[in-house]
Image: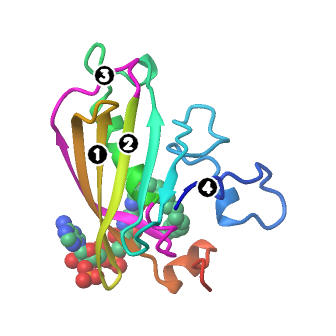
Amino acid sequence: MSSQDTVRHTPLSMDGNPTIDERASHCFGCGPANPQGLHLVFSTDTTVPEHPAATAHLQLDRLHEGPPGYVHGGIVATLLDEAMSKLNRPLDVLAVTRHMEVDYLRPVPLFQPLVLISRHSHRDGRKLFHQAEIQTTGGAVLARGKAVFIRLDKAILARAGFTQPDD
Ligand SMILES: CCCCCCCCCCCCCCCC(=O)SCCNC(=O)CCNC(=O)[C@H](O)C(C)(C)COP(=O)(O)OP(=O)(O)OC[C@H]1O[C@@H](n2cnc3c(N)ncnc32)[C@H](O)[C@@H]1OP(=O)(O)O
């Protein structure tokens, strides 16, 4: 089953009592209200519920340049991090990145269609282990990341004014 992840992209108004999706509307990676953001839109695949996957198609320009003609390494890490973060919702948790590793295998070109893919690997208590890749449309892997996300406990969330989705 594959579905467009539009749930997060909710109203721009911050009046009243905004939901977490509303408060995340300026996320640099996926927030529709951030004029300088990447505006990534992911589809999530929960065919195997315990190993959800997320995919986004994108193309970047010189705003994100590092080496001439190629994407800045920090943006490469951002893409991988964002893709992995999209696995938390299908797993019904709110979580943040605690640790991430990036393998920069090949320069990531500007002005070329790219595919960003992530998949949940496994879970150990509050730790969620995810993986992600940036690929060409032909399937060549340009960058690969893996990360540990930590499920935020109620005390941390309450301090920040959030609750877990299942609460
Ligand atoms: C407060 C804000 C609310 C926000 C609510 C909305 C959230 C939903 C929106 C998300 C949006 C996402 C956007 C894109 C993804 C980001 O960019 S997220 C932003 C970047 N990340 C951050 O800012 C996180 C900053 N770090 C922290 O706040 C704290 O470190 C954490 C995550 C709350 C954890 O703190 P802690 O409870 O003190 O735990 P800590 O000792 O640091 O270690 C945690 C575990 O990781 C393990 N660990 C550490 N390093 C490694 C490693 N290399 N390998 C394996 N395990 C490791 C430790 O051993 C430990 O394991 P256990 O002891 O639990 O078995």
Ligand 1 is within 8 Å of the C-beta of the residue at disc 2: no
| Mark positioned earlier in the residue sequence (3 or 4) | 4
* Element type at mark 3: loop
Range covered by the magenta-colored residues: 87-113
Image mark count: 4
Q: Amino acid at mark 2?
A: Leu
Ligand 1 is within 8 Å of the C-beta of the residue at disc 4: yes
Q: Amino acid at mark 3?
A: Pro
| Residue matched to label 3 | 109
Please tell me whether residue 105 belongs to the stretch shown in magenta.
yes
Which of the numbered marks, if any, corresponds to residue 133? Answer: 1
Q: Amino acid at mark 1?
A: Glu
**What secondary structure prevails in the magenta region?**
loop
Q: Is residue 146 left or right of residue 1?
A: left
Q: CA distance from mark 4 to mark 2?
A: 20 Å
| Mark positioned earlier in the residue sequence (3 or 2) | 3
**Looking at the image, is 76 positioned above or below residue 97?**
above
* Element type at mark 1: strand
Say which of marks 1 and 4 sits in front. 1
* Element type at mark 4: loop
| Residue matched to label 4 | 24
